Every structure is written in structure tokens, then in C-alpha cells.
Amino acid sequence: MSQWIPVDERLPGWGQTVIVAYDVACGDERAVGSETHYADGVWTNPNRMRGGQPTHWMPLPNPPEVT
């Protein structure tokens, strides 16, 4: 299983969609969602949760096998 990677330690590759953990802009909440990384520290996803910035990320899991 993948571990969370701090964004200040390493960023995903250009155009890579990953799972992210956000600090929500208002309050002490945390949120998780998906985000695509497009440049050094620039994330693009219209569904960004309440203005929060990604603090950690991990690769998406492999899809399930179809038998």
C-alpha cells in the first residue's frame, strides 16, 4: 500500500492525477480528494475542496482486475 507523501518533500509528475489530502481553508478540517499536478506546486481540479491546498499525496491505486 502506498504511503502519504508530503508536498514539501516531493511532488507528483506533470499531469499525474493522485489522491490528495487538503488542509481546508476554513477551520481545522482535513479533506481527501483527487487532484492533477500540472506544474511545480500548481494543482488543477475544479472540485478542489473549499479552497484548501494539498499537503500530502499518494498515487492512485491500480484498478481492479476483471476476470
Image (cartoon, grey):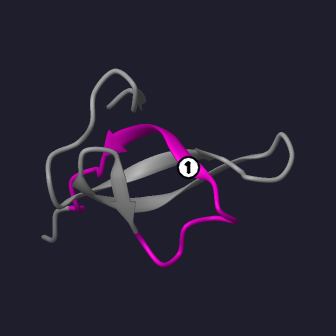
Q: Position of residue 29 (x, y in %)?
A: 79, 45
* Secondary element at image label 1: strand
Q: Farthest residue toward the bottom?
A: 46
Amino acid carrying label 1: it is: Gln
| Residue 59 located left or right of residue 67 | right
Q: Residue at x 82, y 53 (%)?
A: 26
State which region is magenta.
Answer: 45-64
Q: Position of residue 33 (x, y in %)?
A: 52, 59
Residue ranking furthest to the top: 9
Q: Quadrant of residue 5?
A: top left
Dominant SS type (magenta): loop
Mark 1, residue position? 53
Residue at position x 37%, y 58% from top?
Answer: 43
Q: Is residue 46 above or below residue 2?
A: below
Position of residue 27 measured from the top left corner of the image (x, y, whole percent): 86, 46
Asked if residue 1 lies in the magenta stretch, the reply is no
Q: Quadrant of the C terminus?
A: bottom left
User: Mark 1: few, some, or many residues within 10 Å (few <14, many ≥20)?
Assistant: some
Q: Quadrant of the N terminus?
A: top left
Residue at point 23%, 61% (across, down): 63
Of residue 8 and residue 18, the one placed in the foreground of this image is 8
29 up-or-down from 8: above or below = below
Q: Residue at x 59, y 47 (%)?
A: 22
